[in-house]
Image (cartoon, rainbow, N blue to C red):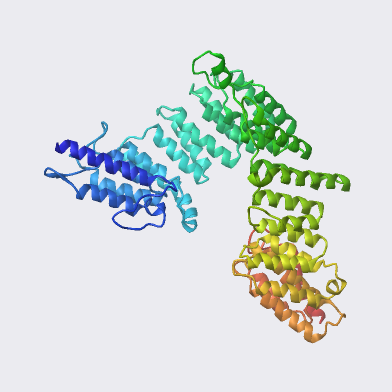
Amino acid sequence: GESEAEEAILYAYTAAIAACSKPTSASLPTREEKSWENDSNYRSIEFLLSLLHEMEHGYFCGKHLVRPNSYTLTAVLLGVDGGLDALKVLDRFEKDYGNDGGARTVDDNDGIVTVQVYNAAISACSRSKNNSAEKRVSRIDGWQVALSILQRMRRYGPSPNDQTYANILQACAESGQINVALSLLKELQKSSFPLTSKIYLPLLKACANTRNVNVAQSLIESMKENSLRITIEHMNSYLSVVAKCKESARALEILNEMFDSKVGDQAIVPNLITLNTVLSACANSDDFESARDLLEQIKEGRFKVAARGGTNSRKSREDVIRPDIVSYNTVISCADPQMALELIHEMRLSRRNRDGVVLPNSVSFTNAINRCRVFINKSQSIDERDAVLDIALTLLELAGDDNVNVYVYSAAIWTAEAVGNYQVACSLLCGMKNCTPNNVCYDGVISSLAQHGLHREALYIYYEMKKKALSATRKTYQKVAFAVRNSRESELFESLTRQAALLEGVLSGMSDRDKEVAIGGPLFESLLAVYGEILSSSNGGSGMHEKQRAFRAARMTFDSIVGSVDDACLTAMLAVCSAASPSNWNEAVTLLHSSDIICGEARGPGKVTKRALSNAVIACAKLRNE
């Protein structure tokens, strides 16, 4: 009885800890009248360890406590994100259970801190914390902690297995340390450790992130040379690298090899993920013809799923791979507007098919309308551009209430912007159904108005956007500044003072977030340029008092930038210094020395180009002339 009770308690708590460790949004019941805001409170080190402590000390079975097993400890580590936290938990487990000869075991390893527990700790090194401030740190330290755990295992045990190395390679890949991962693989290849297919999979996935197709190909070749089993998951990861590198010809060649069972003399049957990845390679390469041909082959039933037995006709029909919504959406993403519209019609009519009903969704319409915008940007004929806009509006109408969302509308608005039709863009913004506009929608309308120099309307839309508490983007301020600087109203276009006043009004309402150059940089640059032009003008009502005010305002504007200053704003401010009379060479030199000087184009905050340096030199040269 005591043994059965202990087993039941251990099983229940291990299952509970494992459930809480999963990153899920499913709501969990309250515990001991405690209210939790969300499940992230359950998936925390403190809560998981409290469950472990409660299991050990809250129940007595006979004369001893309920002790965890390796599954319990592994379950706790599944809820840990980041290498440093995982190492702390692992150290605690080693201290509490590492030499506990009386603890239960689930395998032949001594103690309960087995290789599976260590593997779980290493796996945590490849996961990032949800907190954005800690996410970058956990990514950086993950691979280093994973390698330190490996060194501990090699010295003191337990002996690492293939899953250990697979997890370490995954941690290196997630941290962007692909070269470290490849070095570890070479070390394993030279050692007596038996390589398995499992070790290569995280490396292939890492190649997809770094878009290194040559390394991915060499990994597949290495697996062939070592007679390792190449699975469909390996090939799909390899094809993902090829797709991201936009090599449609290579992707189709790999698919044909798989279809002909020539990959290392192993029969690898493509699945739907394989086919969709090849379609993605064609779409990324803008190779519509190849994508359409492959889609037709899928629809004709050329590809079949891996055989599972059974020969009746119904099962044979079911075993044929059919295109899904991802297949169609991928092909649409590289089609011309007319073909995109035809594919949408084909999908709508698929409800009549006996097999493979694939109805369009919001992504289908978004992709199709975006293709209209791409075609408009390439088209030179006004009639063609107007015809494509009509197709985009037809697609928006076909989307109906079921498939229309803010992304479909934003695609349509930016298509109208590409044509230069601000009336359509404005009407789409005002007529949005079943959704509320986001900042992308507003940016499209502001951009379309700015093209025509309608600064009043552009500013109205901007302030309406701010009133709705939508975050402005860099493009927002870029287009607002363009609208003011290129107004069709001659009075504003010819009055630098009025331009400065309007831009100053926008600046006064910007938040600290917007005053960072990454977002508000274009507005700062435009406003500083206006001040520079005021200082450079010799007439037009720009007297000495107004010029002095312009320089002070420019300096205050420059100082209001939050955080680092980019090259564009620094160059504009140095131009103000050189345009002043007398020149403010001391300000120019101070500003210039506060930044790094590099040759060529500037890269990143705190860098200046030759143009900025020239403005500073001009300011100093004018001092001598004055």
345, 589: nearer the viewer:
345
Residue 184, relative to residue 533: is it above or below? above
Asked if residue 585 lies left or right of residue 495, the reply is: left
The N terminus sits in image quarter: top left
Q: Quadrant of residue 577?
A: bottom right
Look at 88% across and 46% down and name the residue there: 383
Q: Position of residue 567 (x, y in %)?
A: 69, 64
The C terminus sits in image quarter: bottom right
Q: Position of residue 37 (x, y in %)?
A: 41, 57
Residue that protrudes farthest toward the top in the picture:
311
Look at 74% across and 37% down and name the residue there: 340
Q: Position of residue 515 (x, y in %)?
A: 63, 68
Count of numbered circles in the view: 0
Asked if residue 317 lies left or right of residue 56, the reply is: right
Residue that protrudes farthest toward the bottom in the picture:
545
Residue 512, relative to residue 551: is it above or below? above
Q: Quadrant of residue 502?
A: bottom right
280, 559: nearer the viewer:
280
511, 260: nearer the viewer:
511
Q: Is residue 3 visible?
A: yes
Q: Is residue 569 visible?
A: no
Residue that protrudes farthest toward the left in the picture:
63
Residue 339, relative to residue 505: is it above or below? above
Look at 49% across and 32% down and name the residue there: 200
Asked if residue 445 lies left or right of residue 361, the reply is: right
Asked if residue 501 lies left or right of residue 104, the reply is: right
